[in-house]
Structures are given as C-alpha cells and as structure tokens.
Image: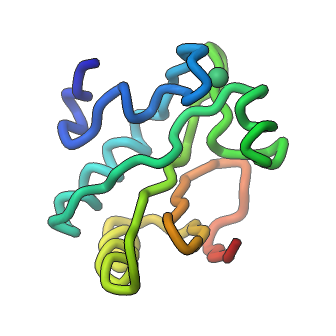
Amino acid sequence: MPRYDFAPHFTEEEFVCKCGCGTLNVNRKFLERLERGRIRAERPFPIASGCRCEEHNKDEGGVDSSSHLASIEEECYAADIGVRGSRGRGIILPALVGVGFNRFGIAKSFIHVDIDPELPPNMIWVY
Ligand SMILES: [Zn+2]
C-alpha cells in the first residue's frame, strides 16, 4: 500500500483498520504532525493501531469516544506507536511534545497520541 505523500514515513497499510474491513480515514493534520515527530525522534514509529471501525474498536476494548474510530464520515485522530523500553519512550515522547502533541496514553508496549478536537488537551494517562 502507498505511503502518504505528506507523511512519507507512514503507509496506508499501517493505518488501515486491523480487522480487515478496509476502514482508512486518518486526519491529515494529525499525520503531518506525526511525521514531524518521527523526523524529530530519528527512530521508527511502528503503528500498532491507527484507524478502527466500530466493531474492531469494541474488540480492542476501546471506549466509545475513542479517537481511533474511523468511518467514511469520521476521521481517525490517533495512533498507538509501538515502543520497546524506557529509552524508546524517553526519546519518542519528548519528540512528540516538541512538535505540539499534548494528549498521550502510556502503555508498556506503546504510546498513544492523538489530537482529537472533542477531547480535552494536556492529558497523559496510563493503561
Ligand atoms: Zn474494521
């Protein structure tokens, strides 16, 4: 699947819903900022989860207001970036902050980042 021309470190394949339904609708501003974060971090951002259709979001235990939710009408504003260990977290998180992200979920194996306009800014939660 093709790379995003405005975010060349990312492919559509990484962001399409993992259930096989083909749902793919990522907010462009989000992806452009993610690309800037990726360049700043100078390390790969493997996308563990991008778009989710309603059904797949339920399977993943995602909340109804999840910023991963996507459909033809609804854009996904989120990505879970796979990280391994403290060092990865310690490089990727500051790079994301540096390009203006301010909503994060920190898990053992990934960092969730989003710019959902319907959710409050300046949040960091843990799983
Ligand atoms: Zn799906």
Quadrant, the N terminus: top left
Colour setting: rainbow
Give the residue displayed 18% in from the left and 37% down from the top: 8
Q: Position of residue 94 (x, y in %)?
A: 35, 79
Q: Nearer the viewer, residue 5 or 19?
A: 19
Q: Position of residue 21 (x, y in %)?
A: 60, 14
Give the residue displayed 54% in from the left and 60% down from the top: 112
Residue 121 sits in which quadrant? bottom right
Against 87, residue 47 (above or below) is above
Quadrant in which ligand 1 is drawn: top right
Q: Position of residue 57 (x, y in %)?
A: 73, 37
Give the residue displayed 34% in from the left and 51% down from the top: 46
Quadrant, the C terminus: bottom right
Against 90, residue 62 (above or below) is above
Q: Nearer the viewer, residue 95 or 54?
A: 54
Q: Is residue 106 left or right of residue 12?
A: right
Q: Nearer the viewer, residue 8 or 13?
A: 13
Q: What is the total number of numbered labels drawn onto the structure image?
A: 0
Residue 4 sits in which quadrant? top left
Q: Is residue 82 left or right of residue 77?
A: left
Q: Is residue 71 left or right of residue 26?
A: right
Give the residue displayed 68% in from the left and 26% down from the top: 53
Q: Is residue 105 left or right of residue 96?
A: right
Q: Position of residue 56 (x, y in %)?
A: 71, 31
